[in-house]
Image: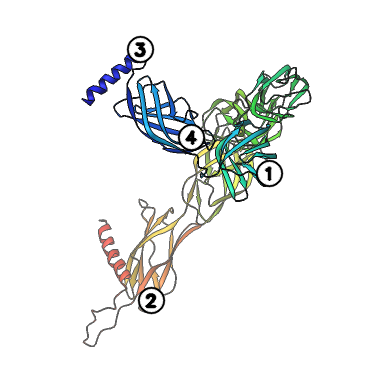
């Protein structure tokens, strides 16, 4: 039955909309939230009707017997819920006091809630501020406001008025009634926009009106609203804002803009004449500031970059691919280069800009690092200013195809081809199309950890010499090199080979007193030859002549004979080939055998240390496995 009634109701409501006449039957209001209020309040309430009987707007809301209670046009929150703002008279007597019926007259029908709302006129409510008139003002305005409270006891000389936030000052205050204050306030040009709480403190009484006053951005119109650098505008008209303008009103539009004259024909507009925009006026939004009356309108006038604002040149205008640090100078026309807020970019990847410095408004210096992964060819250079201002039309100048990345030369050889860690070597470098110049060419090595250079001398355009000092702990990784002369680069990829020679292994790594043992020594980054010499530190060892196999230049073999009384110590092992040598410290261990025991057995030996014994056994096995047939 209820479902059928719901369908009928919807159909009747639709018919009512078509006929512009609501049906004449009533429905219940189930609830209202909040269900109580205090005289003098202006509050928002939510009315809920029968679930199956939807509200259809428009609708009017009234109270009975409180006909003086007014309600705004309701908003539909759901099919059965309406929201409205009601205003209750401040008087403590009248038909608005006490229990109230709520009536809703809508296109979908008439709704009623009996004895569903109550207004408290007893005066027992908390003191509060209920209105501020006017409820808003512009930044920079100076105005009179009326503050109205409920359940308050304002007192001249005692009551203090305050607005939340910063930027609003109270110039004077007059208490006209126990619940009314008249005040003169000033809103500074730096005041933030938005709603403010209003508070009146009278001794221990604190009355607050949350968000009752709003600081607004001034509705000011400038005609025209923009101008071009180096332009003179014959006239500019300011309209809107607080009004009350005169020829004595002080006007400012920021640095670089001067005003020749002004007038105010009717007090609601200001007419400016001969407005001159300097060639170096900052591009982007400018604030309008007025005094008498006070006003600050942010960003209402825009300075546009002039057509004669150009990037004229860059010197030098080219460099080879891979140049590590090219100093360039840029020249502009009518530009406003500024260290604090300038950026330079190229329309080609892998070019890093550093040390950007503005000598003045039209001259800019920078350093370019052109990566080897960049591309050859022409590139645009762009200088942008005003990046920190968030402006929509910041100064931007571009020199199309203004810079060229060219093909580098090549480093073709270094003599000696290999550098040894721990040594200092005079190296000769040869280039193809090097274009070396004495006193101008420099060498860049990367990575440069563990290697330093000195004494670079240019022999001719394609040859130079340099002393390279290699640290003893320098890594053996190949290094890139660049010989740079002005804008020219000669590149060498994996050009410098650093060797860090060492003895990689000695097998076996020890021997007993009174024995002879064949030993194999293996090196890293070191080449043996038939003339290589081997030595052990200490006494008690006899070494055979080294055996060298040219198929295995990193290995050399000897036989070590250990005397019966050789000291039981670890020995350093050194191999020398020509002028170069490598050493393994404490790399070979001498061990001792025991004497015969009391039973006459000579087969027992003092055990080697676990590590030495293991190395000894592994050494024997290794030799057996590696031994090649004659």
Q: Secondary structure at mark 3?
A: helix
Across and down, in percent, residue 199 comes to: 59, 42
Which label sits in the foreground, 2 or 4? 4
Q: Secondary structure at mark 2?
A: loop
Q: Secondary structure at mark 4?
A: strand
Q: Residues within 10 Å of mark 3 (few under 14, many from 20)?
A: few
134 is higher (above) or lower (below) than 518: above
Find disc 3 in the rendering and name its residue: 18
Which label sits in the foreground, 2 or 3? 3
Q: Earlier in the sequence, mark 2 or mark 4?
A: 4
- Residue nearer the viewer, 35 or 95: 95
Work out whether residue 156 can be spotted. yes
- Residue nearer the viewer, 274 or 84: 84
Q: Please identify the quadrant where the N terminus is shown.
A: top left
Q: Earlier in the sequence, mark 4 or mark 1?
A: 4
Find disc 2 in the rendering and name its residue: 568
Q: Which mark is residue 72?
A: none
- Residue nearer the viewer, 527 or 611: 611
Residue depicted at 34% across the width and 18% down the height: 24
Disc 1 to disc 3, how far (Cα)? Answer: 60 Å
Q: Residues within 10 Å of mark 2 (few under 14, many from 20)?
A: few
Find disc 1 in the rendering and name its residue: 156
Label 2 near label 1: C-beta < 8 Å?
Answer: no
190 is higher (above) or lower (below) than 403: below
Find disc 4 in the rendering and name its residue: 43
Disc 2 to disc 4, how far (Cα)? Answer: 102 Å
Q: Earlier in the sequence, mark 3 or mark 4?
A: 3
Residue depicted at 63% across the width and 43% down the height: 154
């Amino acid at each position: 039955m209820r479902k059928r009634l719901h369908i009928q109701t919807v159909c009747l409501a639709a018919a009512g909309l078509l006929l512009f006449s609501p049906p004449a039957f009533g429905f219940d209001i189930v609830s209202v939230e909040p269900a109580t209020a205090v005289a003098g309040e202006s509050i928002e309430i939510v009315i809920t009707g029968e679930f199956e009987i939807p509200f259809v707007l428009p609708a009017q809301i009234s109270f009975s017997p409180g006909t003086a209670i007014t309600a705004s046009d309701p908003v539909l929150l759901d099919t059965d819920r309406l929201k409205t703002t009601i205003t209750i008279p401040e008087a403590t007597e009248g038909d608005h006091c006490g229990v109230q019926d709520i009536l809703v007259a809508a296109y979908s029908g008439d709704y009623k809630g009996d004895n569903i709302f109550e207004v408290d006129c007893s005066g027992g409510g908390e003191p509060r501020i209920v209105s501020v008139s006017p409820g808003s003002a512009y930044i920079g305005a100076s105005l009179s406001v009326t503050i109205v409270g409920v359940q308050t006891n304002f007192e001249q000389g005692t009551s203090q008025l305050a607005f939340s936030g910063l930027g609003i000052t109270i110039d004077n205050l007059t208490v006209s009634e126990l619940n009314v204050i008249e005040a003169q306030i000033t809103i500074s040009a730096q005041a933030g926009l938005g709603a403010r709480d209003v508070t009146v403190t009278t001794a221990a009484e604190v009355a607050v009106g949350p968000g009752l006053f709003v600081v607004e951005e001034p509705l000011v119109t400038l005609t025209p609203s923009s101008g071009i650098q180096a332009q003179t505008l014959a006239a500019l008209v300011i309209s809107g804002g607080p009004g009350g303008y005169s020829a004595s009103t002080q006007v400012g539009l920021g640095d670089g803009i001067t005003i020749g004259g002004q007038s105010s024909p009717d007090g609601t507009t200001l007419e400016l004449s001969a407005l001159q925009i300097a060639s170096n006026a900052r591009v982007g939004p400018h604030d309008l500031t007025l005094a008498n009356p006070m006003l600050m309108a942010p960003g209402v006038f825009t300075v546009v970059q002039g057509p004669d604002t150009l990037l004229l040149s860059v010197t030098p205008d080219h460099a080879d691919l891979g140049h590590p640090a090219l100093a360039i100078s840029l020249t502009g026309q009518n530009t406003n280069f500024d260290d604090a807020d300038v950026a330079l970019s190229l329309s080609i990847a892998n070019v890093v800009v550093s040390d950007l410095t503005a000598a003045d408004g039209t001259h800019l210096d920078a350093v370019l690092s052109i990566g080897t992964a960049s591309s050859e060819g022409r590139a645009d250079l762009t200088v942008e200013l005003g990046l920190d201002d968030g402006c929509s039309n910041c100064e931007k100048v571009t020199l199309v195809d203004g810079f060229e990345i060219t093909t580098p030369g090549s480093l073709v050889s270094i003599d000696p081809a290999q550098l040894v860690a721990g040594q200092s070597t005079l190296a000769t470098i040869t280039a193809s199309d090097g274009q070396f110049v004495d006193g101008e060419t420099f060498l860049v090595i990367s990575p440069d950890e563990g290697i330093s250079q000195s004494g670079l001398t240019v022999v001719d355009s394609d040859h130079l010499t340099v002393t390279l000092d290699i640290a003893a702990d320098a890594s053996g990784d190949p290094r890139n090199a660049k010989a740079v002369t002005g804008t020219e680069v000669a590149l060498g990829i994996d050009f410098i080979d650093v060797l860090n020679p060492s003895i990689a292994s000695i097998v076996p790594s020890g021997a007993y007193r009174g024995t002879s043992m064949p030993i194999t020594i293996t090196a890293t980054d070191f080449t043996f030859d038939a003339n290589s010499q081997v030595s052990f530190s200490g006494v008690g060892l006899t070494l055979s002549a080294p055996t060298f196999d040219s198929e295995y230049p990193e290995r050399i073999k000897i036989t070590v004979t250990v005397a019966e009384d050789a000291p039981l110590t670890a020995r350093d092992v050194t191999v020398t080939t020509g002028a170069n040598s490598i050493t393994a410290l404490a790399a070979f261990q001498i061990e001792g055998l025991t004497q015969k025991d009391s039973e006459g057995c000579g087969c027992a030996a003092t055990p080697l240390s676990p590590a030495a014994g293991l190395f000894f056994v592994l050494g024997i096995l290794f030799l057996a496995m590696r031994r090649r047939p004659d």
